[in-house]
Amino acid sequence: MTNPDTIVPKHVPRVVPSDPVPVLDLRSGPDSFGTWARSIGRSRVLLLTLAHQDFRARYKRASFGVLWSIALPLFQSAVMVFIFSRVGHFGKGLGFSYAGFVLAGMVPWLYLSTSIGTSTTSIVDASNLTDKVFFPRALLPLVAPVSNLVTLLISTVILLVALPVVGQGLSLRFLLVIPAMVLLFVFTASIGLALSALYVYFRDVKFMVAAVLLVWMYVTPVVYPQSALQHAGKWLDFNPLTGIVGLFQRAAVGGAEPSARALIVTVVVTVVLAVAAIAAHRRHDRLFVDLL
Amino acid sequence: MTLPAIEMEGVGKRYWKIHERSLLRSLIPFGPPNRTELWALRDADLRVAPGETIGIIGRNGAGKSTMLRLLAGVTRPSTGRVVIRGRIAPLLSVGVGFHQEMTGRENIYVNGMMLGFTRARIKALFDDIVDFADLGEFIDTPVKFYSSGMYMRLGFSVAIHSEPDVLLVDEVLAVGDIGFRLRSFDRMRAMQQSGAALVFVSHWLQAVQVLCPRTVCMHQGRIAYDGPTEHAIARHHELLARDGPRVVGGHGSVRVLHRELVATMRGPLGIVQQDDVVAYRLRLRFDEAVDSPQLLFRVLAEDSTLVYQMQTPLGERWRSFAAGDETDVVVRFRPRLGGGGTFRVAVQVTNTDSSITLADDESGPAFFVEPRPGVVGVCDLDARIAVDDEDRTDQRSLRFGEVRAAAEGA
């Protein structure tokens, strides 16, 4: 390259402007992990579009629109605070605002419970679509956790605003919600992935999920501090949600919870679930449709 | 050498027919098997070159939709291998993939992305898509207010604008109005010319015939024939006649022992021309004595609409049959069914005043009528369009006659 004039002209007419021809090679076995992962990666814009659509469609016909996503957690928290402080006499002598504590616990709980129900049935619900056009099925259970992130963000902001109102001072500690949200998202997405695959094969799963969600909130320190249970409280550490909810509450009102053990349980369970769910989706990606 | 756009090698697809799929049951390791296997497709070998168009025909359950699913990549084969080179666009059935609450505009984006468009590409093609779909102001209306025709136009428009290398077309085209159908056919022809492979799966034999030079006839999960469309259609009718359900209802005192449809068949096998004489021969057996039975002859379209009926003089006394008598009946007719298509004959034997049905044979043999050039519809009214005394009547085969001519010349 001594003479710069010999370098190719600036505007090289591109003969083939399109992408390389994709080749679909289907055999009886599942796609390799690499192929599967790349197909997910390529579909990320589709995932975002589906999530965007899901979010918009949900509130489209309601006059108050997205306001509902703020009103509901506030309303449910208010009901909980009223019941447990008036009837159950919780929340006295805690050293922090009980209302703030409940609101902080409700934020992740509502995100999880609304996402999981939709995720579980997502593949089956989309059967008319999956029958005709191929895209990684793993996108479907991810739509709800992704679109609900908007609601999660909004309600976290509400939490931030509400804390001073209920008499809880703010501190930098609130930044803990960031790792808490990441953990919550990965945990919820993994459960959704796993359950959606399972639901294709076993339709009982939907009802089991409903039953579990009914109980889960009460075995998670959402409306009561873990310490309020004294000795029994430490068993809640084995509930993977304890760590996540605890992080939100700690960010909001402080306290000693969650314990390191609870956080370790959360992380381990999340990783195991994610690995199992990904393995199931890779294996069954093009087989789900046979059972719909 | 160009590689085939579609390659299937020894492809089989097994489904499990599950008797009882419950969590509890599947946890029991032993016990009677919970499922039986069902091969929807076996030993399928198929190669489609870029730019080639093939039709796939066959009865319901012959394996057509399994084939389509495999080609769309939504399921994987149980045996063998499917290779598809290029972008695939399945032409989605009515309403598939659309979100009811969202407008046509919003749905174009999601639908396009599912077909592998990038957002920028959709933006660039957006106006073309909307124009082709011809939705006007409805583009900003939620699709749940769309008619089935509008739905289909939108879906089709998105699919063809994705510039696929392989376009899979299902029954959908039967929905649109004629104008849109013709535009779609034109568009498909353009895609053929630009090198896209087209797979057209349909019961609508007439469309298969005009669009596809080559057709695969499926039968019981196997490829029964693969070759020129006329022969495939002939094979299809042969198979239909062989194992068509002999549902003979009615009182049961008269049985149809034998039936055959004979045409003079100047055209290729299995396809009758409008002016041919077709003879439907029947042998009836009377299991009980019947006085003055009457016979109704019908021609039914594929969707069982009555196209034609003629009967013996009802209420008139003419002859009595004793128990055990057998008799021959011949019905001769000219299938002047303008736009052509698949039809079947049906007969009914009744008592004298037609108050009791003695035999009801709804599913007689089917036949395929060659369309009269330029005619769409069930009959030929021999219409002429004159504009200022100039005859502007289209005598060509639905405007894509050239496709056929090219195919026949090849």
Image (cartoon, rainbow, N blue to C red):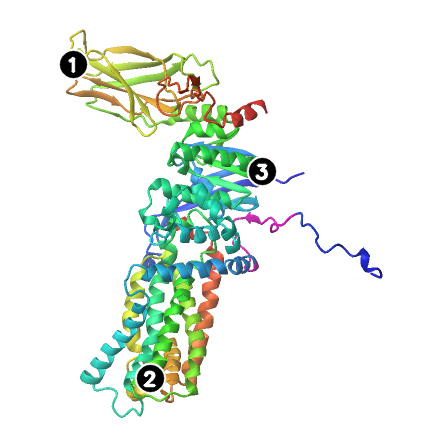
Neighbours of disc 1 within 10 Å: few (<14), some (14-19), many (20+)? many
Residues marked 3 and 2, same chain: no
Residue A93, how many percent across, how many down?
27, 93
Q: Position of residue B374 (x, y in %)?
A: 43, 22
Please tell me whether mark 2 sits on a helix, a strand or a loop. Answer: helix
Magenta-colored span: A16-34
What residue type is disc 2 on? Answer: Leu
Left or right of B251? Residue B29 is right
**Distance (Cα) linking label 1 and label 3:** 63 Å
Task: Report whether B60 appears left or right of A75.
Answer: right
Element type where label 3 sits in the image: loop
In this rendering, is residue A218 above or below B44? below
Q: Amino acid at mark 3?
A: Ser
Comparing A72 with B214, the one in front is: A72
Q: Which residue is mark 2?
A: A163
Q: Secondary structure at mark 1?
A: loop
**Viewer-nearest of discs 1 and 2:** 2
In the image, farthest residue toward the top: B318
Residue pictured at 45% horizontal, 76% vertical: A267
The chain ID associated with circle 1 is: B
Residue assigned mark 3: B194
Image point (28%, 65%), residue name: A64
Q: Which mark is residue A119?
A: none
Horizontal and vertical percent position of residue B165:
55, 43
**Residue at the image position 40 percent from the left and 85 percent from the top:** A259
Residue B27 drawn in magenta: no
User: Does label 3 lie on the same chain as label 1?
Assistant: yes
> Which residue was labeled with disc 1?
B352
Q: Quadrant of residue B192?
A: top right
Mark 1 residue type: Thr
What percent of the width, then of the height, locates residue A97?
Answer: 30, 87
